[in-house]
Image (tube, rainbow, N blue to C red):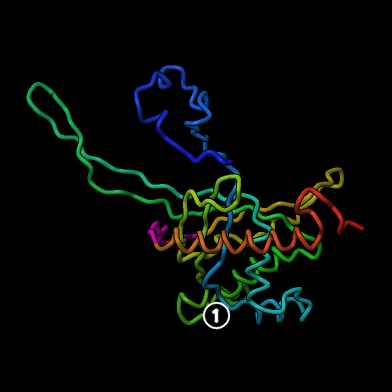
Amino acid sequence: MAVPQSFGAVTSDRGAGFTRRWAANSADAVDPYITGYFFTKWAHFPELKGMLDYTYNNNSPFTGQKDIKNALTSSCTSVTMPGGTVNKTDLYGLGGLKYGYPTNVEYDNTLTMRFTEWQGAPIYKIIASWVKVMRDYRTGVATYNTKSNFAASMYYWTTAPDGVSVASAFLFTGLFPLRDPSDQFGHDLTANDKLETDIDFNVDVVWQEEYITNKCQGFANTAKSVGSANAQSYGYEDGNQTGVQ
């Protein structure tokens, strides 16, 4: 029987604060936050299919927007979050006594995502086409009408190691890439390795609301359900591998 998460050992005065041994009593478990369990889901996304087909002679591996969004989701291996800085001003009293007062909060507006590249360079083709939608590299002029034609939004959430229990959830809006990753194709004859690329995205707002957490919890539940169904189809459930050929 699973022991429910409890912060009693942390919040109460039982001496555990001295040893920091929070898991000493199995009936009062306090699990640490384990990193590395994160998920993304692109929501609004610019129309890139036409640019992909035009640029790559209809040899695009994507049949539509859903394929493009799923490729970015599946290939993302790292996310670096933007943060915020509370700025302050100092006030002075008699004899040089000083105290601070907050003036404003300044938020970073860059989100960095790392993607694993695949044969045929589909990730590069997505990002490069996205940049071309914003500016035609031959003429320098824009190829869009409004920001909604080139900016995207994306849900991002982290979970416990079960992949379902959402710990934090965010919605990024106003996303667009800040570099054309063509430079990733500079190779060294003596270096053979997988290709990963870090892409910086502009982000206008990082939303943190209850409805976003609920939305991401729904995504997590669905992903778990689909994952379990796939595992059953391969015979991995209940400790067996009957579906393995």
Give the quarter of the figure containing the N terminus.
Answer: top right
- Residue occupying the point 76% across, 60% down: 232
In front: 13, or 188? 13
Quarter residue 49 falls in = bottom right
Give SS at disc 1. loop
At label 1, the amino acid type is Thr
- Residue occupying the point 42% across, 57% down: 206
Asked if 128 appears above or below 20 in the picture, the reply is below
Label 1 crowd (10 A; few <14 / some 14-19 / many >=20): few
Across and down, in percent, residue 66 comes to: 64, 74
Across and down, in percent, residue 224 comes to: 63, 58
Image check: 230 left or right of 204?
A: right
The residue where tag 1 is placed is 143
Q: Which residues are magenta?
A: 202-210
- Residue occupying the point 58% across, 75% down: 133
Image check: 94 left or right of 172?
A: left
